[in-house]
Image (tube, rainbow, N blue to C red):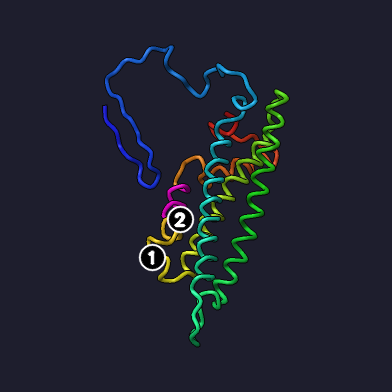
Amino acid sequence: MGCGRLNGTGSHDIVVKDAFVKEAYAVDFDSPVAIDTAYSRLPIGCINAAGCAAMALGVLKAAMDDLVDMCLERVTSGKSPDLRDRATVQATIAKSKTILASKRDQLHHSVEVLWEEAQQQNTFTDIQLADVWAASCEGAREARDMVSEIYAVAGTASLYKKHKIERAHRDIHAILQHGIIQPHWMNQAGMAYVGLTPNGAMFRI
């Protein structure tokens, strides 16, 4: 048995070699659901993508709030312009607030549609699933881009560990490395939108 730590996540992987596992203890993606509830009926693939997107948007909010706090705290009486006086900082804060609000709304709405269908024990359509995949992948991507922009406009302050921006910049990239939120899922969503059948292994699971 061996284990390894995944950088930037705090998680651990366990590897078991040359050990027989009885079929009764094995679970596959195609295994029947043992507990039939609205939650267990949700598709694990796009719901995991939505979870990654939610984390990414949360990291964006932390970085954005930290930049705002820095602007309010670092006000001097001298003639030199403060951090809050920079046009790039002002624009970045306004942009990040807009992106955060819009991507959150899109993600919440798309997941809520699946939740309502799960409660009614209905079958999810490819369009409904595509909406979650697209909202998740694009929301996470824009969150990463926005955090990188915040990191840049904050200047040397971004390098100090006492600020959340420094960690947010690392964490957002760790989140976007997850396979469930890679760009090819946008192609899968696009296939559904143009009348094709998405063929990704986890698109409907």
**Segment tinted magenta in the rendering:** 169-176
Judge whether residue 108 is colored magenta. no
Judge whether residue 170 is colored magenta. yes
Check the image and report above or below for 44 versus 165. above
Amino acid at circle 2: Ala
Would residue 148 be found to the left or right of residue 119 on screen? left
The mark that comes first in sequence, 2 or 1, is: 1
| Mark 2 vs 1: CB contact within 8 A | no
Amino acid at circle 1: Leu
Q: CA distance from mark 2 to mark 1?
A: 11 Å
Q: Where does the image place residue 41, in percent across and percent down from the top left?
A: 62, 25
Q: Residue at x 57, y 28 (%)?
A: 205
Which secondary structure, mark 2? helix
The quadrant where residue 159 appears: bottom left
Q: Residue at x 57, y 76 (%)?
A: 87
> Alpha-carbon neighbours of circle 1 within 10 Å: few (<14), some, or many (≥20)?
some
Mark count: 2
Frontmost residue, 123 versus 154: 154
The quadrant where residue 15 appears: top left
Instruction: Read off the residue under disc 1.
Output: 159
Frontmost residue, 123 versus 38: 38
Which secondary structure, mark 1? helix
Q: Where does the image place residue 55, in percent across and percent down from the top left?
A: 52, 46
Q: Residue at x 65, y 54 (%)?
A: 101
